[in-house]
Image (cartoon, helix red, strand yellow):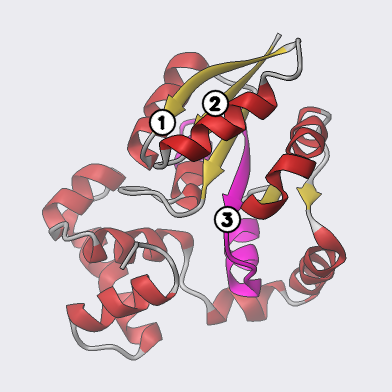
Amino acid sequence: MKRILIADDHEIVRSGLRAIVETRSNWIVSGEATNGEQAVALALETRPDIMIVDYSMPIMNGLEVSRRLKALHVKTEVLILTMHESEELLTEAILAGIRGFLFKSDARKHLISAVEALLDGRPYFTSVLLEKLLHDYQANKQNRADMLLTSREQSVVQLIAEGHTNRSISAILKLSVKTVETHRASAMRKLRMSSTAELVRYAVRKKLVSP
């Protein structure tokens, strides 16, 4: 029996994903999470084979969830769901070590195939466009990495935009306050920003948080 964990902050989405997963007699939903922190806790508790994770979640986005699981040596494969077709988002996902990427609009038709691929140890990226972006990323990894915020910097920016202090961010991400301050300063330098308000606007624009 394969165990699937679903993480999305919208109940209607979780219900729809559960309905699709449960069409397979040898798959079981091992839990549902409404934010990234809960998703990590449930993964540690239930050790699912696959996690279906919404990219835009409170506290920790899908990329930070994947990063945390890898740091904890949890061998669960992560399938990221997103509403937005973005070269930058795909590149961030690959940098975070994610091997499954699916648009929410494609979930009804492709979710089963995506989960099957990850269970078989194969990556799954929808559409020819995403395959091309993956190829381009591999050819230009260093250049892309230098242009983007790191996954950790993205997570810090998200939490700042959600109203967390440096101290609370350090507790959530298991980092020292000084390290959080370093990531915050690095993100602001890369984005050429000088205020928290600018970071919040960036987070909303990049769909890290809801407006």
Image marks 2 and 3: residues in contact by CB distance under 8 Å: no
Which quarter of the figure has residue 184?
bottom left
> Does the magenta run of residues contain 82?
yes
Query: Which region is colored magenta?
Result: 68-95
**Residue type highlighted by circle 1:** Ala
Q: Residue at x 68, y 51 (%)?
A: 101
Disc 1 and disc 2: Cα gap in Å? 8 Å
The reply, left or right, for residue 98 in relation to residue 205 is: right
Q: Within 10 Å of the Cα at label 3, are there few (<14), some (14-19), or many (20+) other Cα atoms?
A: many
Disc 2 and disc 3: Cα gap in Å? 16 Å
Image marks 1 and 2: residues in contact by CB distance under 8 Å: yes
Counting labels gives: 3
- Which numbered circle lies on residue 82? 3
**Does residue 103 appear in the picture of this structure?**
no
- Which numbered circle lies on residue 33? 1
The residue tagged with tag 2: helix, strand or loop?
strand
Disc 1 and disc 3: Cα gap in Å? 16 Å
User: In the rendered view, would you say 2 is above or below 120?
Assistant: above
The residue tagged with tag 3: helix, strand or loop?
strand
The residue tagged with tag 1: helix, strand or loop?
strand
User: In the rendered view, would you say 81 is above or below 87?
Assistant: above
User: In the rendered view, would you say 200 is above or below 122?
Assistant: below
Query: Residue at label 2?
Result: 5
